[in-house]
Every structure is written in C-alpha cells, then in structure tokens.
Image (tube, grey):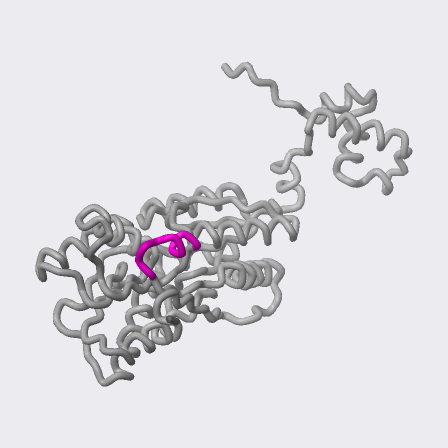
Amino acid sequence: MSSFKRLTIDDIAALAGVSRTTASMVLNGHAGRYRISQATVDRVEAVAREHHFNPSQQARSLRSRRSSSIGLVIPDLTNSTHAALAQALENGCRALGYQLLMVTSDEDPERESAGIGQLAARQVDGMIVVPCSGDAGRYQPWTRRLPLVFADRHIPGSGIPSTVTDAADSVARLLAPLLERDVAELAYFGGQPDLSASRERLAGYHQALRAQGMAPQPGWVAERDFQRESGYRLMADWHQRHGRYPQALFTASITLLEGVLSFIRERHRMREAPRYLLTFDDHPLLDCLPLAVDAIRQDSQALADASLRQTLALLHGEPLPAADIRIPASLNLRRLAG
C-alpha cells in the first residue's frame, strides 16, 4: 500500500475551518454567485496555495464533459523537428488554458493505436496526430469520438484535416541551385514510401531533376524509414556498392542525416564525404559541423498554431479555417550561398 496521502477538498475545508461545500464553491470560482465573504475566500485560497492544491480535474471533467486537455501523438521525441512541434503546441495550449498530453509511437502503428486509445481514455478534448501509417482506416473511427487532426503528415482522401509543410516546393527550391552547377549525381535517402512526407519530398526531388532535364539513375533513390539507423544503413549500402560517396546527397529528414553523418565519422572521420550534403529539417548544431549542410527549415510554430486552430474549431463546432493547410518552409543555404 502506498504511504503517500492524496490531499482532498475535505482536507482543505478542515484546514480553512469551513464546510466542504464552501471550499468547493471558492476553489471552483463560484464564491460570488453564493455570496461567500471575501475573508472566507481569502482564507480558503491561502490554504490551497500553501498546500499546492487544485480541484480534481477528473471531477471537473465529469461535470463539464470537458477535460481542458489536448492529446498529441508524435513518432519520436528525439527527432528535433517533432520535439519543436511538441514544444510549440505545449506553449499554445497553455496560453489558451489547455494542458497538452503526449505519447510517442516510435513509428509503430500498433503502439500508435494504443497511445491514441490511452489519450482518448483520459478524455482529451481533441487530438493532434503525426501519423506513422498511411492507412486512413486506423484513424477515421476516432473522428466520431473526438476532434482529430493531422500535423506534419497527412493522408490524402481521408477526410481528416491536416497542417503540413509544403514539402515538394521546398525540396525543389533547395535542390535547384545545386543542379544548376556541374552536379551529375544526386542521391536521395528517404523514409517510408507510404507516408505523405516521403512521397512529397521525393516528388520535390523529381521536380528539381526534371527542371534541369535530368532523371534519377538506377540506385540514386533509396528509402527505408525515418530512423537514424536507416540513414546509417543507407549510407553504408551505397558506399559498399560504389566504393565511394555520391557527389551530392539529399536526406529526407534530419534523423536520416544523423545516421549518414555517423557513418562518415565512423568510417572516414569526416575527411571523406559527399561534396554536397542537403537535408529536410534544420538544426543549429549543423552550423558547427566541418561539413556544410544546406537545409530546409520547417516553421514549427506555424504548424502548431494552425493545427491547434483546426482542433479547437472542430471542438467548438466552428467552420475550419481550412481543411488542409500548407505551411511554407525557408532554406538555410550554408554552402550553396557561398
């Protein structure tokens, strides 16, 4: 049996010398309605502050049918892009009086489904999901129970609102200056082919090649998933097949880039590498590398703001600002600008 004692409103009432009903009215903001004296209000609130007591959120939820919480499902908190999204959403929720509750899927659809179920069981008012599956049927049943929107990734035709980065356009803009030079080989390492993020980033790669009258050669495009280990394996496989690095390499996520850099450091101590390295997603630590990496910088704040607006619009039965929102990205051209 636990030795910890959970403080109840009965305890606060006893310490303040008032009835349980009076303490409840004060702490739930109804003192004025029931003409409770200011002296009593001050005494009850002082006791509650001293003991760090807040009324039970569960009890409030039962009365109001609202929990003042928003659920978030993301693949991986070690992914700096998803961590930035989570932080922006937490700040946004807090500013609007909501608590963000979060679970991770580890890019595993079964773990993701379990996490969604856990959040729903906690009666979250709405849910924002970075989906790790392209199967709309895994998510559509939940939309009958609570507001659910996608962020960062989406499933076209699912009917589920989404906010994503305009990936194809940003990839094409990143690669265009490179291909205008004397680059004859541009490899692409991507994530799961069934995810929208993978398809759209690959589409931008093909768009950039077509604009220069080029086509990918056999072996240029390789896809696994967005895990760091996959970046390492894709780079190792390329080097084993060719006995060298590609002239230029674009990775479809910073986690894949981390794996690539791990291989380069382990095998050649950064003394050999692709002449040009480019990636989707950016991080300040890339400024500190001996290799210049040109990157696409997603706007995590705009992604968070738009997805939260969609969620709350659904919650309150208001028209959506837009069903599917595209957020522009910016470029950080560390090498190509020179």
Task: Give the residue at x 32% y 73%.
Answer: 175
Quadrant of the snapshot with the C terminus: bottom left
Q: Is 291 covered by the magenta stretch?
A: yes
Of residues 145 and 228, which is closer to you in this image?
A: 228
Residue 12 pos. (x, y %)? 74, 24
Where residue 205 appears, x then y in whole percent?
A: 28, 73
Q: Is residue 164 left or right of residue 67?
A: left
Q: Image quadrant of residue 21?
A: top right
Instruction: Indicate left or right for 90 with 199 as reference.
Output: right
Q: Tell me if residue 324 can be seen.
A: no
Relative horizontal placement of residue 281, taking residue 234 as reference (left or right): right
Q: Residue at x 39, y 53 (%)?
A: 288
Q: Quadrant of residue 193?
A: bottom left
Q: Is residue 316 above or below residue 327?
A: above
**Residue at horizontal 45%, vertical 68%?**
329
Q: Is residue 267 left or right of residue 74?
A: left
Q: Is residue 248 visible?
A: yes
Query: Foreground: 11 or 300?
Result: 300
Q: Position of residue 285 (x, y in %)?
A: 40, 52
Total numbered labels placed on residues in the image: 0
What segment carries the magenta color? 284-292
Residue situated in front as seen by the camera: 126 or 326:
326
Quarter of the image where one finds residue 37: top right
Indicate yes or no whether the magenta region holds residue 274. Answer: no
Residue under the point 38% across and 55% down: 286
Q: Is residue 107 above or below residue 62?
A: below
Horizontal and vertical percent for residue 152? 42, 61
